[in-house]
Image (spheres, rainbow, N blue to C red):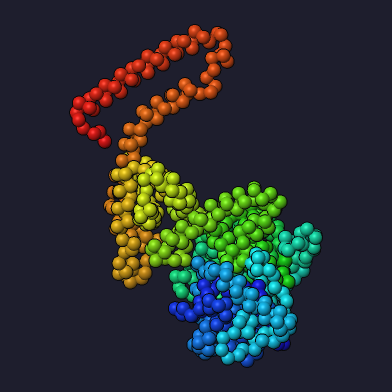
Amino acid sequence: MSRLPLKPTVIKRLFAVSKNECAYPSCKNVIVDKFGTVIGEICHIEAAEVGGERYNHDSNDEYRRSFDNLILLCSNHHKKTNNVHEYPTEKLKKFKFEHERGDYSISDNIVKQAIDKYMEQINTNGSGSQFNNQAGTQNIGTQIGSQIIHNYSSLNDKPFIDGARKVNNTLKTLISNNKKTGSQPEKTVIDFKNELQDKTVRDIVTIDVKFLKFRKENGRIKADVESYEKTNDIILEEADDSTQSLLKNFLIKNDPEKNDELKRSLIQKGQREPAIITCDGFLINGNRRKMALEELFIERNQDPRFQMMRVVILDDGSTELDIQKLENRLQLQSEGKSEYQGLNRALTIRANEKKGFTLEAQLKDDPNYHDMGPREFNKVVADFKKKYLLPLECADRYLATFDRIGMYNTISEGANDKEGRWQAFIDYSGFVSGTLQNKSKMNDLKIKENEVGNIENAVFKIIRKRSLSVKGTDIGKVHDFVRKLPKYLGNEEAKKLILDIKNVPEDIPEELKNDKDGIKLSDRDIDEKWGADNREQILGNLIQAYRHIHNQEERDKPLELLEDALKKLQHDNLKIDNMGTTYYEKALELIKKIVEKADDIYKEVDHARYKYKSLGKTKK
């Protein structure tokens, strides 16, 4: 079969996340010049046709033309990467992954220019015309060497994940050959596409657990996967046995209490709901169930009750968007099994957004928000950004500060990580948006623009220290401290002490990161050692800062009490006409005591003022 044409929606996405640069590491050659001319090239990672570089017989034509199999390169590096021995599939995937991650946006104008040129070629040459590579620079479409067809959605439409996911045909055959008729009930309706509304019935089958695969994109272990890939500078191949073992370990340590609870439920009640898998056996949901069944099968002396798993198999050709929506419905929506820890949920939401499945689209797909009016829905969107995306931006800046980009397991190690830092980032992001990005609040606290970066650096070091407990103080846990930041920064002496923490080094020497046997310490152990080395300066400054604001609070308290007393006396409800006549005598008695006490307080303050003036000193 000849190669399929590339879809304009895929091309649009490629250019949108390209930074308008060649994806080859350190190459700064632009893809689209200032005139809108495409001087880069759209390249297949795995060849579109037999005989091409890195052609994969187990793949399919839909995947070969999908976003995941395409990379934008300059002409020189396109030629260079044709050397398949030096540039295997995994290496090009890594180039693509590293290039497109992070802040990838380019101007809408560049994307629009590219798409306009592409559409111009279609309109000029007609649907189905062939564009072959030619010498010199060419407009978008001429670089493709493919049949062009009309399937373009307006540039103003929301981007979306396009193309069928890559199917492992070997695993697909394994699933097809080993599925068996399920126990009652044998049919079900799942929340896939519009099947729930249309009441589309699907078969439930049983498959030996050993043939099923954990998904790398499982939102429950998103932080673990991204951290591992970043730390080890690799992209995990989902089907590999080593990757499957790794994913299982991530699931085991993610939430041990829930895992034990699930195992008890499987023993007592069996499998109540079927899992859903791709046609080649990757679990959309039920990843923890597979893990639990495997453990029970061994623990219970190969009890056949725990050997088979009830599943519904999705059709070949399901798109990544279909699967992302399905997982969103099964795992993340609040009416379902919303057990995802905050950090993992934030990473999943953002990963979906990068693939074109916007936050708004994710929420509209949730029945809890689907029919909301614009004003109420916009508030929900803002709340999700506040709870997930803005804290994640702060967490990313934190990781960059300590040269740990992408190492999210250093923020939290799972749902039961009591010392996790995620809550601190939720509170700090609120402080950033509510104070550091609010000129009026900054003026109230006398924070200068040139102090903002130093404040963030100091706060990140306090968050990294994590353990702030000091006997005799009420500093609290790290997120408690972050919530009190306005008080600390509103006191000039306390602010100086907080800012001084910026001078704490970001790391410990490399030679101290290994144990006595030369084995590298875990990130948590490195954090503990860093915290111990800098404990005196961080906690010492915090203790002094705490005393300053504590003393300030003690000084402010009398005035606050007087203000509160005056407010009560001026309250709108204090209307004599509403007072019953039987209370007049009691009211006059209380007023007399108020006047006498007010007179005593006045004399006491006046006397203190006189002493202050006579000393000729400023009391601080």
Q: Position of residue 380 (x, y in %)?
A: 61, 50
Q: Give the vertical position of 618 relative to 448 (above or below).
A: above
Q: Position of residue 382 (x, y in %)?
A: 57, 52
At 37% across and 66% down in the image, what residue appears?
Answer: 521
Q: Residue furthest left?
A: 615
Q: Give the vertical position of 379 relative to 68 (above or below).
A: above
Count of numbered badges drawn on the protein: 0
Compare residues 520 and 465 and report the one nearer the observer.
Answer: 465
At 64% across and 50% down in the image, what residue appears?
Answer: 377
Q: Is 536 on the left or on the right of 3, as rendered?
A: left
Q: Give the vertical position of 318 relative to 461 (above or below).
A: below
Residue 324 location, quadrant:
bottom right
Residue 221 appears in the rendering:
no
Quarter placement of the C terminus: top left
Compare residues 475 and 64 and report the one nearer the observer.
Answer: 64
At 57% across and 15% down in the image, what residue appears?
Answer: 578
Compare residues 111 and 495 and report the one nearer the observer.
Answer: 111
Residue 274 appears in the rendering:
yes
Quarter placement of the N terminus: bottom right
Q: Position of residue 414 (x, y in %)?
A: 50, 58
Compare residues 496 and 33 and report the one nearer the observer.
Answer: 33
At 55% across and 82% down in the image, what residue appears?
Answer: 40
